[in-house]
Image (spheres, rainbow, N blue to C red):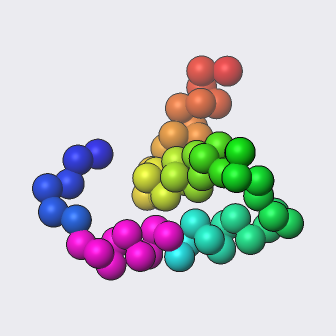
Amino acid sequence: MFRRFTHINGVESYWSWTKRRLNKFNGISKRHFSEYLLEPEWRFNHRDSIEVDLKKLIRKA
């Protein structure tokens, strides 16, 4: 989704939320760091529509 204006608070909110999600792992290697970020990124971008997306996935199965 494209938003015309982005505020620094949105970036800080995302990073704070992501750090809390990543705390469940006991350390993350630098080699795989970008891969660990993919799941929280998807969840953050779809946080308002996750139930709708889940229903679509179930219907496709």
Q: Position of residue 16 (x, y in %)?
A: 53, 76
Residue 38 vs residue 13: left or right?
A: right
Q: In the image as oriented, which residue stretches furthest toward the top? A: 60
Start and end of the magenta stretch? Answer: 7-15
User: Considering depth in this image, is 34 or 54 the residue closer to the camera?
Assistant: 34
Quadrant of image for the N terminus: top left
- Identify which residue is drawn at 55% across, 72% down: 17
- Identify which residue is drawn at 22% across, 65% down: 6
Q: Quadrant of residue 11?
A: bottom left
User: Considering depth in this image, is 46 or 24 the residue closer to the camera?
Assistant: 24
Characterize the magenta stretch by its predominant secondary structure.
helix
The reply to whether residue 39 is visible in this rendering is no
Q: In the image as oriented, which residue stretches furthest toward the front? A: 30
Q: Position of residue 13 (x, y in %)?
A: 43, 75
Q: Position of residue 36 (x, y in %)?
A: 67, 50
Q: In the image as oriented, which residue stretches furthest toward the left? A: 4
The reply to whether residue 22 is visible in this rendering is yes
Image label count: 0
Q: Is residue 36 magenta?
A: no
- Identify which residue is drawn at 81% across, 64% down: 27
Quadrant of image for the C terminus: top right
Q: Position of residue 52 (x, y in %)?
A: 49, 44
User: Considering depth in this image, is 5 or 58 the residue closer to the camera?
Assistant: 5
- Identify which residue is drawn at 60% across, 47% down: 34
